[in-house]
Image (cartoon, grey):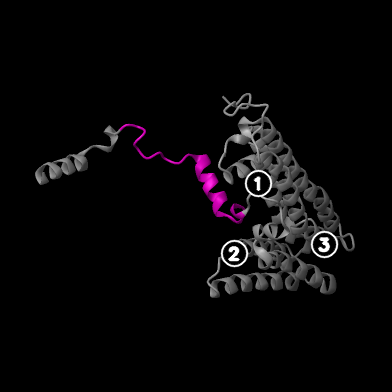
Amino acid sequence: MTAVGESGDSESRERDPHDEPESEQRREPSFADQVGGVIRGSKLGQLDPTAKPSARALIEAMGGVRGLIESLLPGIVFLVLYATTKSVWLSVLVPLVISIGFVAWRVLQRGQPVLAFAGLIGVGISAAVALFTGQGEDNFLWGFTVNTVVVLVLLTSMLLRRPLVGVIAGALTATPHAWRTERAKRTVAWQSTTLWLIVIGARLAVQVPLYFAAEQGTAGAVELLAGAKILMGVPLYLATLWVTWLMVRTVLETPDADTPAGTPEPGTR
């Protein structure tokens, strides 16, 4: 009996994995699986799209109260310092020091410094550009670049018939492809992605003209630009995320009765 067992073990060890049936081989994760894993591992992964929206859950998705402070304080400090001193150096370096302090604080507490570090990178790039040109309004060029990239990503996802909100919502549920196979979910995916496109586009539509006004030397334009960035930043994102959650929740609770499961979106075959 022992010899037979050892022989079977030897054959099992020597078996070429390529000879195994395809169903027994380990399936390599697809790009969609990898994207879903990243989303589930992020702060957004803490949200349950089918649950009732709550302010606490939304704040946690934005990094908690500390995350909100880390996002808002550098911009507020810039606005106050520039409005009172008109010093570009002081107005961009103090927020940079504050951002460095946030990262150090998280590291010392052995917390997760990812969001704080991402904020530090943004503040650092913005400060470097403003210090290089000597113009306070150039502190906002990096933000314009990021918003433009987001708009392009949203547009690309829609052109590829994979609206980004649908991809994210699908990654947070047990039916990641339902937003393409069920009519109601598909409609909400398009509508909510369009909503974010409008919101990000509105940021650019309001702030870019203020930037050019500041470039022309219009009094108070930099302060207005800084204020617009704050108001159209975290507060607007929270409101948009709340509306998106409400929209997605209405169709994720039950399958769409009009479209049989497994029916692909037209043009996706």
Secondary element at tag 3: helix
Q: Is residue 134 left or right of residue 167?
A: right
- Of tags 1 and 2, the one toward the viewer is 1
User: Is residue 75 visible in this depiction of the protein?
Assistant: yes
Three-letter amino acid code at disc 1?
Answer: Thr
- Of tags 1 and 3, the one toward the viewer is 1
Q: Which mark is residue 227?
A: 3
> Crowding at label 3, few (<14), some or many (≥20) Cα neighbours within 10 Å?
some
Q: In terms of depth relative to the viewer, which is nearer, 12 or 155? A: 12
Secondary element at tag 2: helix
Q: In terms of depth relative to the viewer, which is nearer, 242 or 74? A: 242
From the image, tell me which residue sits under label 2.
117
Three-letter amino acid code at disc 2?
Answer: Phe
Residue at image coords 54%, 50%? 38
- The answer to if 249 sits in the magenta stretch is no
Location of residue 178 in the rendering, given as x and y in whole percent from the top left corner: 60, 35
**Residue range corresponding to the magenta coloring:** 21-46
> Crowding at label 2, few (<14), some or many (≥20) Cα neighbours within 10 Å?
some
Three-letter amino acid code at disc 3?
Answer: Gly
> Crowding at label 1, few (<14), some or many (≥20) Cα neighbours within 10 Å?
some
Residue at image coords 17%, 39%? 11
Q: Is residue 145 above or below residue 262?
A: below
Task: Point out the residue furthest to the right here.
Answer: 219
- Quadrant where the C terminus sits is top right
From the image, tell me which residue sits under label 1.
50
User: Is residue 128 visible in this depiction of the protein?
Assistant: no
Q: Is residue 91 above or below residue 26?
A: below
